[in-house]
Amino acid sequence: VSLQRRGKVWQAVALALAAADLMIASWGFNPASDPALLDYTPSAIAWLREQPGDWRYISIDEPNLGERGKILNANMTWRYGLDDVRGYESIIPKQYVEFMKLLAPQVQLDFNRVAPLYPDYQYEAMGREERLDTILRSPLLALLNVRYAVSSTQFTLPDSLSALWSLAYEDDAVRVWELRETLPRVYGVTDAEIDALTIPTESIGTFTITHDSGREKLIDAEVTQPGWLVVSETHLPGWRAFIRPQGAGEDAEQAVEVQLVRGNFQGVRLSEAGTWTIRLSYSPTSFQLGAFGSFIGVVLLLFTGGVYLWRLFVAQSSSESGVQVVARNSIAPIILNLFNRGIDFAFAFVMLRILGPEGSGIYYYAAFIFGWFDIFTNFGLNVFLTREVSRDRSQAWRLLLNTSTLRLLLMIVGAGLLAAFLGARQSLVAPPLVGEALLAIALLYIGLLPNSLSTGLSALFYAFEKAEYPAAVTTVATISKAVFGVAALALGYGVVGLAAVSILTNLVTLAVLAWSARGLLTITRARPDRRLMRGMIGEGLPLMINHFLATIFFQVDVVIIEAIHGARMVGQYSVAYKWVSALNVIPAFFTMALLPGMSRLAREDRPALLRTYRLAIKLLVSVALPVAVVFTALAYPLTGL
């Protein structure tokens, strides 16, 4: 014991010593400046801020003059809202560096900087052959939207540049030179000049930036002929563009491609003359994937912590009352499935961004059709299995074997029904479904095999009143589906990739459930019983119809909308349904938690069954009314989110 205590003491001392060492070593490292400097604006900066329009500047540095020769350190003027073509950043896009090398030597890359310009003597000292006179004549400055060059007061431009540059401002600290002919932040060029690194000789219209948040720009355009809109911003993957007639809302937008043009910049092809509003938005997939990865990390921490606390405080005991059993078997599935809906929402944010409304509509339609056949192959067998096994647990293996066999037979029948439906859809409705949608439906149907067997095992857990097990497995499956789904989308596999992921997820779910259920079953040499399966069909038919009524039939409008308006409208329409589907978790799992007990009461105590039924209805209605009011009142912001 004394050795253990000594070890803990030395651990604490070592930790404190390491912390003290770090603090002593870096105590004077971070410099401090007078905050009053933030309130001072130099005269030259004030003058530059008064100049109209969207433009950039560059500096002409003279290191031999000491600090006075270092003009406006890179990034320094961000706080004043001035745009600089230089930059100081540990990660600089190679594309921009290569473009700037066409203008001037990039001699500060070792210091994470895009370099300023230098006088000739400085270039000679560096062993460079470039000359400032040539650089200041380059049309690349105009392409970069440069209007001003800032230098020390000792610097003077040669007379040979007087036709291009003029002295616009001077004080005791700096001189500001103005480029007479430059390009605005946005402009138009013809198809013939889009690849030329020169000032355009012909414009295709007028362009005005009406909003610029940095991440998003709105540009009003009066286009006189087809051509290109060029934005003097570095093109990077993640820029998206949308075009609509001026005055129209965002619902009239059409997506257009943002392309790399003129060596570095953003270009949008405008195929028609007219008055348009173009919206450019920076929404990189890498950011969404990073945010989603962080979200999944939090989800895993919450899930594992919740499982630990559940096992610690709510684990099943032999002394539980009927109310405790119902509470345990309803609360855990409801909480976990609402948790799963949260994961689905986060996944939907990424999916909708990558697939867009049309791709999302194709997948939602395919999943909707899959849902029909999921219910058909289930045929009410979940409820039947839970009801019968809860009455006689010794029959668990026999009933599971026969229900699983019947599910496989129903899958064979369902394959024919699915082929007939798709054949009718392709021949009777125009336009026919695209190949992507057909392949997605086929893959989802293949995944129905492990999925159907998994639902049978879940029903078995409910019969043994251990609903938290399949609920936890479903959460694992939901996390897997989201992670693999995002990976498929990031790799460009689209709707088909998501459908293929469902097969993998269903196989994982089946394997985990089968392993978890091994303690519930006593496997015998029982064989499929035809008479029992015929009885299951009779018992299951009304249960299947009820399942259709409760789950699918109220959404039959999805099929109608797809046939009339197409996949894009279905994608938009599906957004609102995500909230409805999330809410349906509550009655679905509450009633499943009641089912085993009510099944026994139906045989043993009918008055108690009636009391249980009435209490359940009161509880559901007491939840449904306020939820309906709140979600109706918040319908617009929830759907907008």
Image (tube, rainbow, N blue to C red):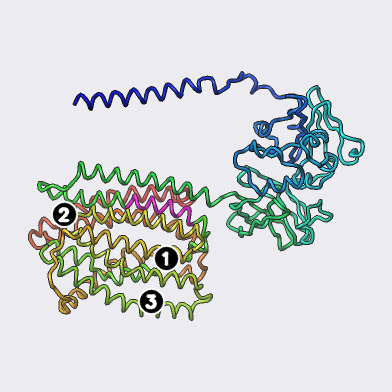
Quadrant position of the N terminus in the picture: top left
Q: Is 341 colored magenta in this rendering?
A: yes
Question: Relative to residue 88, is residue 19 depicted above or below?
Answer: above
Indicate which label's residue lies in the foreground, 2 or 1. Answer: 1
- Distance CA(mark 3)–CA(mark 1): 16 Å
Q: What is the crowding at mark 2: few (fewer than 14 residues within 10 Å), some, or many (at least 20)? A: some
**Is label 3 in a helix, a strand or a loop?**
helix
Q: Is 79 colored magenta in this rendering?
A: no
Determine which residue is flagged by label 1: 499
Residue 522 image offset from top left, x and y in percent: 13, 64
Q: Is residue 1 visible?
A: yes
What's drawn in magenta, residue-wise? Answer: 337-351
Q: Is residue 155 left or right of residue 24?
A: right
Q: What is the crowding at mark 3: few (fewer than 14 residues within 10 Å), some, or many (at least 20)? A: some
Task: Count the marks.
Answer: 3
Task: Give, as a three-letter code, the residue at label 2.
Answer: Thr
Residue at 40% x, 66% y: name it. 368
Residue 179 image offset from top left, x and y in percent: 83, 40
Indicate which label's residue lies in the foreground, 3 or 1. Answer: 1
What numbered label is drawn on residue 612?
Answer: 2
Q: Quadrant of residue 414?
A: bottom left
* N-term mark: 2 or 1: 1
Marks 3,2: beta carbons within 8 A = no
What numbered label is drawn on residue 418?
Answer: 3
The residue furthest right is 159
Residue at 30% x, 24% y: name it. 10
Residue 477 image offset from top left, x and y in percent: 33, 57
* N-term mark: 3 or 1: 3
Residue 398 image offset from top left, x and y in percent: 15, 70
